[in-house]
Image: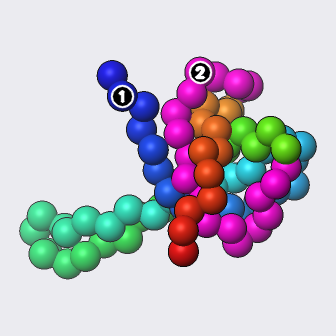
Amino acid sequence: MPKRILSGVVTSDANEQTVTVSVERRFTHPVLKKTIRKSKKYRAHDEKNTFKVGDSVRIIECAPKSKTKRWEVLEAAEA
């Protein structure tokens, strides 16, 4: 099964080798036919602490690195 790749914005870089990435998805409500925005936060592994708050990044699924980290930063996303 292929690994998922998501893009989002770094919302926290307080922890060592970890960033929190907020990923937003948009979809049409099935009944109201209105565009809904939902966001979810993922904790991702950032080996060299290169990404700061506000950076757009792409993250990829990986084997668990810690209790909460199951993603790692793939690259900076083009804005």
Q: Please indicate whether residue 33 sits to the left or right of residue 72 in the image.
A: left
Seen at 25% across and 76% down, the residue is 35
The image quadrant of residue 68 is: top right
The colour scheme is: rainbow
The image quadrant of residue 74 is: top right
Seen at 12% across and 64% down, the residue is 30
The N terminus lies in which quarter of the figure?
top left
Q: Is residue 19 above or below residue 34?
A: above
Q: Residue furthest bottom?
A: 34
Is any atom of residue 41 visible in this view?
Answer: no
Residue 45: horizontal and vertical position, in percent? 72, 39
The answer to whether residue 39 is magenta is: no
Q: Is residue 10 above or below residue 70?
A: below
Label annotation for residue 2? 1
Three-letter code, disc 2: Ala
Three-letter code, disc 1: Pro
The image quadrant of residue 56 is: bottom right
Residue 10: horizontal and vertical position, in percent? 68, 62
Instruction: Identify the secondary structure beneath mark 1.
Output: loop
Q: Please indicate whether residue 35 sits to the left or right of residue 24 in the image.
A: left
- Where are the magenta residues, as a range? 49-67
Label annotation for residue 30? none
The answer to whether residue 52 is magenta is: yes
Q: Is residue 65 above or below residue 10?
A: above
The C terminus lies in which quarter of the figure?
bottom right
Instruction: Identify the secondary structure beneath mark 2.
Output: loop
Residue underneath mark 2 = 63
Residue 22: horizontal and vertical position, in percent? 58, 60
Is any atom of residue 18 visible in this view?
Answer: yes
> Considering only order in the chain, which callout, 1 or 2, is on the residue closer to the N terminus?
1
Seen at 64% across and 45% down, the residue is 73
